[in-house]
Image (spheres, grey):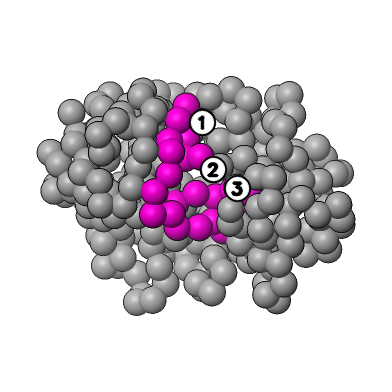
Amino acid sequence: MSGRLVRLRRYPVKSLLGERLRAAEVGETGVAGDRSLALLDQATGLVASAKQPHRWRVLLTLRAAGATPGVRVTLPDGRHLSTADPDVDAALSAAVGRPVTLVDAVPPDAALLRSHPDAVLAAGLADEVPADESRLGAVVPGTFFDFAPIHLVTTGTLDRIAADLPPGVGTAERYRPNLVLDTSGDAFAENDWVGRELRIGSDLVLSVLAPTPRCAVPTLAHGPLPQETGALRVPARLNRVEPLPGLGAQPCVGAYARVVRAGRAAEGDVVRVG
């Protein structure tokens, strides 16, 4: 099976909106500059994540672009901050309504809280619901990734979900992939790629590890995109599978991958599924 890389994205600050790239180096820790920074909740020491919507959905009103040390953060009112500014912590704390510290070094045992998605759908975004503490960097220790450094999804999967959503609510943006692939095959073909290798361009090789289980994040407003609970309800109906043994069936969109051989990825590159 073959196809093309049609979109390449990175998210310089974890849980903030990210940016589209035309090309980037991809290594063991993923797309260069991806999730290189995060916000720590000063009260709990946990990594701030929109996976806990009642507290952190505001993060998806901020957008990060560029590479360290001068990542630029755009606030909802259009103002820009540099992560190199000496007062960046105070400015970000004011923007999110809670004291936070911007960090580029992953704390020991870094973790976040992941609200139960079904509970969020039932209770609403403003209510505190049961949440699990989730350690970061399972595949690449010492990183801010939830599990693996690459998240990919096919246009076939996105198009199938979009067919059951209102027009104009967005799909790729909600699921926050690094790579959007246009390949032949049915929706949710990524499920069948687990254990296989993807070759992108002339050098980059990925190993697909598991389908990506979805939290409440796709349902949230993303910048100008409105809240849309169907972004979770639709995959829950169409693609509820067990991503890893012991986790039970969960709504999944896309797949996680690790980097087998580093290389450069560019939009338009040929993709081959081995």
Spatial separation of the CA atoms under disc 3 and disc 2 = 9 Å
Residue bearing the label numbered 2: 34
Quarter of the C terminus within the rendering: top left
Within-10-Å neighbours for mark 3: few <14, some 14–19, many 20+: some
The answer to whether 91 is drawn above or below residue 249 in the figure is: below
The amino acid sitting under disc 1 is Thr
Quarter of the N terminus within the rendering: top left
Within-10-Å neighbours for mark 2: few <14, some 14–19, many 20+: many
Q: Position of residue 107 (x, y in %)?
A: 74, 29
Question: Residue 165, located in which quarter of the rendered image?
Answer: bottom left
Image mark for residue 29: 1
The answer to whether 57 is drawn above or below residue 68 in the figure is: below
- In primary-sequence order, the first of circles 1 and 2 is 1
In the rendered structure, the answer to whether residue 105 lies left or right of residue 42 reads: left
Task: Provide the residue span drawn in magenta.
Answer: 9-32
Q: Secondary structure at mark 3?
A: loop
Spatial separation of the CA atoms under disc 3 and disc 1 = 14 Å
Residue bearing the label numbered 3: 67
- State if disc 2 and disc 3 touch (CB < 8 Å): no
Q: Secondary structure at mark 1?
A: loop
Task: Report the number of discs.
Answer: 3
- In primary-sequence order, the first of circles 3 and 2 is 2
The amino acid sitting under disc 2 is Asp
Spatial separation of the CA atoms under disc 1 and disc 2 = 8 Å
Question: Residue 150, located in which quarter of the rendered image?
Answer: top left
Task: Note whether residue 114 is visible.
Answer: no
The answer to whether 199 is drawn above or below residue 226 in the figure is: above
Instruction: Please name the residue shown 39% across and 59% down the image.
Output: 172
Q: Is residue 30 magenta?
A: yes
Return the residue nearer the eye: 194 or 118. 194
